[in-house]
Image (cartoon, coloured by chain):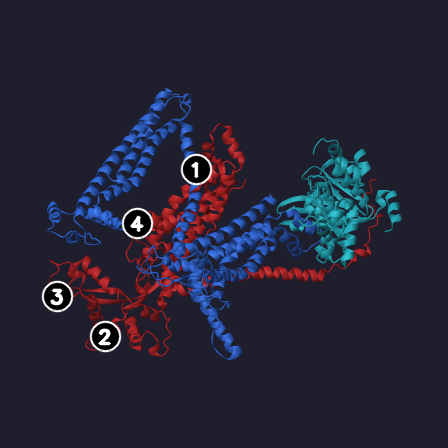
Amino acid sequence: MSTSLLLLIIVVIGFIAFFAGRARSFAQSGGKLANLHSLPGYHGSYVVIWATLPAVLVLAAWLIASPFYIDSAVRSALPDSVQSQGAATVQLALGQVKSVALGLDRLSAADIAAIENGSANLRETLAAKGVALAGEGEHYMVAAAQQFNSMRLYSRWLMSAVVLIVSVAGGFYAIRNIAIRFRARNQVERVILASLIVASSIAILTTIGIIGSMLSEAGRFFSMVSPTEFFFGTVWDPRFAAAGNEGASGQFGLLPLLGGTIYIAFVAMLFAVPIGLFAAIYMAEYASPRLRSTAKPLLEVLAGIPTIVYGFFALVTVGPFLRDISTQLNGLITGNYQNFIQAQSVVTAGIVMGIMLIPFVSSLSDDIITQVPRALRDGSLGLGATRSETVKKVILPAALPGIVGALLLTASRAVGETMIVVLAAGVAARMQLNPFEPMTTVTVKIVHQLTGDLEFTSPQTLVAFALGITLFVITLCLNIYALYIVRKYREQYE
Amino acid sequence: MTEIASPTVKVSTRPAESRRDIGIKRRYAAERRFRFYGIIAIVIGLFFLAVLLWSVVSKGYTAFLQTTITLPIEFSEKVIDPKNERATDPKQLMSANYPLLVREALVKQLGLDPKERPLVKQATDMVSASARTQLRDIVVADPSVIGKTIPVTLLAEANIDSAFKGQIDLKVDESKRKVKDQQVAWMNQLADAGALKKSFNTGIFTFGASSRPEAAGVGVALIGSLYMMLIVLVLSLPIGVAASIYLEEFAPKNRLTDLIEVNINNLAAVPSIVYGLLGLAVFINFAGLPRSAALIGGLVLTLMTLPTIIIATRAALKAVPPSIRAAALGLGASKMQTIFHHVLPLAMPGILTGTIIGLAHALGETAPLLLIGMVAFVVDYPGSPLEPSTALPVQIYMWANEAERAFVERTSGAIIILLIFLVFMNLGAILLRRRFERRW
Amino acid sequence: MSEAAVEKALDQKMNTVPYKMIGKDVSVYYGEKRALFDVNLNIRENTVTALIGPSGCGKSTFLRTLNRMNDTIENCRVSGKITLDEDDIYDPSIDVVELRARVGMVFQKPNPFPKSIYDNVSYGPRIHGLARTKAELDETVETSLQKAGLWNEVKDRLHEPGTGLSGGQQQRLCIARAVAVSPEVILMDEPCSALDPIATAKVEELIHELRANFTIVIVTHSMQQAARVSQRTAMFHLGNLVEENDTDKMFTNPDDQRTQDYIMGRFG
């Protein structure tokens, strides 16, 4: 019985359970619903929960656990000659057995007999039936594969039987419980509450998943490359990341990438902060409602445009434009028509990222500025201060912590931005200060190390996780500090 | 005491000290400057928006037109199936020399000498190499066409397409451009004869990946994106709403819920690429799900979208006034009933708005998908979320890395398609908000 | 005006004191809604004028027209004429910043800036450029705080934040802040409504002293307060000026039945 069919049967049982539970509570109430503690629908739902939830949990547990059990059973049945050759060989043999098991269904009894007495080659026979086998294959594998298949079949039937029994038994147990004073609603609500808690724990699980997965993979990386070499190395040259090239060692210096990341983020902030801040001040303090209701959403459109579009914009419009204009400028001043800005450069990426950040700065600061209480504004205006004096001397100082928080959040976004820098910053990992030259970032290198064929054992691949955890920690610190500041700021004016 | 404003009462005169100099002129100049900076900042922001959109649209709108050449193709049996084996060997129809059919039709149409090889080659280069599969599909679908002559509309090769759209400067020396003078002459000849013309490019919506710009489209990527959006919607909306209800309505205020709160706010600001790393390590490396599958993309984007939805939902729940809750509880409804019968329906517009905005964000997300291997050259429509597929923004990324100029046009075209989707989603969110906005 | 003249003026009958501000047919609209109906009210020099009336009667609205604080409210429109000395304050030639430097304001809730006490008081003189040197500024701060009766309490902690003071002290700080600009008129919008009785008594005392140098208009909810601090009282009801009279007369023998009812506590 396939899993989906089993699930379908459980759903059907659930439906029956609902109506059965409802009917029984009706019968118990003797036609007067007011006699019941809970409405019949809750009794129905109560029975449904008992009929389906335990069964589904058993099913899930079985599906997760049984492959491990079968694997270990088959593994222990492998000949000693294989067992003695170490875990890697056993794993390889197990994989082959599974392939054989897949092909076994397609073989006739005669084929199997021929293989077992050695008159036919296992690999060729299987290949003829469309199953590819890695390696030659050994005779014992057929028996192991047969064992594997029969265990799987047995497990399946057993699982179906157990799940169905649990489902039906649960349903009957629940129906027996139904009585006039039975608090079905409270029971149902308790299950709902539990599922709400499970849902909200997913957020925590995500963080644990991020930290756990990255720590374990980065740990494997640091067992090959020393952390000092990674965190303080000044040369990034990971060499090849191809499969089977594990011996080739490269240099994994983080500093050039970190330098590029910070430099580009800095240029972007340099561009975005004055524009965003002034726009926010104008929107909050000067703009008429009509201007505000058109200009503000228009600016926010910039935030809704996917970053890949910004990347493309940088690649085909801004980069070439800067290059050409630098050629013209250079020609006008020195007579030498040679561009001094590269198409892919720190400024290209920085400016385009800055454009992307403008709406972040402006809408976050706008929120912060409008939270400054009206009383302060009135106090200053009432003393005869002009609008700009009020903004500069009262509102901005009062809003400063909030604005700093907003800028930190923006900076965290700039550091973690990927698509713009992938397309516009360049790939050369260099430590230098000329903003017109290409530099590369942490995110670019994560993408580069992880596209193409992956070998999860080489440092060239695993370094991406070390870079990832570095990035995560940096943005985590920025975010938490920023959120803390903004929260304190909000509380102050609440 | 009734002479409230009797004429005997004097009006005070302005005392001398009130005429003190408080630097009004200077201060108003500063005021104007300050205001000007604000306007300039907004103008700069809007200017960039305009340049960005103009840059994409001006480069991309031509991608929705495609030059085609309609030729009377003679499906001659001599070429397709010279030994008459098709009844016994179906492979014969798959591997026949279809380009020869195109060549013969062109030679006839242009009146060329078939022996002048270089000239004939130049002529056949004008038709996209995708003609092979196109003709093959016609024959395989209906073998009875063999022996007949049917007019078939073929795609023009990308450079001819560009030339016909006027994007190639024909004044440049012939050796420095990809379209030769002879080809231009033929192009005009065919256009005059009505065989070559521009028409609406349906292919960009239906084709999959191709190394030839004229045969490349976002159709396959759209399906991949559709799968992912469905997965994100189906998973993140219920989970997000459930989590928000717990956190907002039930959770006790303690260290743990504080931690969850900070955690969710932080997750909303974690770089998207980190989610890609998570997907790679957990779903592919640990759980062993297939790479490049829309399922994993959907799961990763779900995790990424969840915090956004939770934050929006909690704000919407918070906006429902306590009086509604008090009223329902006062009638003897349980807390759960109060929430599901009263609070949640009232918060629904806010929740849906947040969800749509989260979905729009997920639709445009690229970086995490690169890491889970969705940068695949996928030609066929994925039949299920477990098959290799790609997504619209990833397709844009892949095309952006192509060198050919015709791909710039395609890339911009794909961006326009993406932006149109986003515009519709955001408009939907705005309308929803307008329609159901409630003020207490 | 010399000290002696002021004393003399105070001793004279109220209606011989010259008018500092004259409001003629003042109406205020918030969008479509009319909040004030052709109010004619004159403010006498060096006098405390109290505006009383039930909530929503337009007394605060009228007060805010006197230094054009209504300008800061969206779609608020004022018609009629208000003069300060001989100047029409709604005339386009009159600058609102200059006007507010002459007509200061103290608000209902104490609203010190989140800065030091010193910076709060010196803010006005600084933006208007009233002090040329640091010493001059120090002196202005000191005299203003003295006038506000706060000097002794805060002289040792001038550089601590103003938000750290108690509510009553904060309100007196706001008064000192207004005084530091040396306006001619000070408007007070229920300055004691957020304060406890002891702090209220201090502020009332202060208002009484300030009268010698400033013309004061105060909006208040409390009859007793109006009776205690003011010489003239104006009663508003539903956007109309009901009666304006000497405070003594108003509270003993008002001309208008509605005033009588209000003072007796029949509505409000």
Q: Above or below — where is A175 with respect to A306? A: above
Distance from Cα at disc 1 to Cα at disc 2: 72 Å
The residue that mark 1 highlights is A197
Q: Above or below — where is A181 with respect to A401? A: above
The residue that mark 2 highlights is B120
Are marks 1 and 3 in one subunit? no
Are marks 1 and 2 in one subunit? no
Using the image, name the chain to which the residue with label 3 belongs. B
Instruction: Mark yes or no: residue A114 visible.
Output: yes
The residue that mark 3 highlights is B82
The residue that mark 4 highlights is B386
- Does dot 1 land on a helix, a strand or a loop? helix
Distance from Cα at disc 4 to Cα at disc 1: 30 Å
What color is chain C drawn in?
cyan
Question: Does residue B440 appear left or right of residue A256 in this picture?
Answer: right
- Does dot 4 land on a helix, a strand or a loop? loop
Quick check: marks 4 and 1 in contact, CB under 8 Å? no
The quadrant of the rendering that contains the C terminus of chain C is top right
- Does dot 3 land on a helix, a strand or a loop? loop
What color is chain B drawn in?
red
Distance from Cα at disc 3 to Cα at disc 2: 23 Å
Q: Amino acid at mark 2?
A: Val
Distance from Cα at disc 1 to Cα at disc 3: 71 Å
Give the class, few, some or many, for how many residues have Cα within 10 Å of label 1's Cα (few <14, many ≥20). Answer: some
- Does dot 2 land on a helix, a strand or a loop? helix
How far across and down, in percent of the image, does residue C156 sit?
Answer: 75, 47
Are marks 4 and 2 in one subunit? yes
Camera-nearest label, 4 or 1: 1
Give the class, few, some or many, for how many residues have Cα within 10 Å of label 2's Cα (few <14, many ≥20). Answer: some
Q: Amino acid at mark 3?
A: Pro
Quick check: marks 3 and 2 in contact, CB under 8 Å? no
Residue drawn at point x = 46 percent, y = 38 percent:
B245
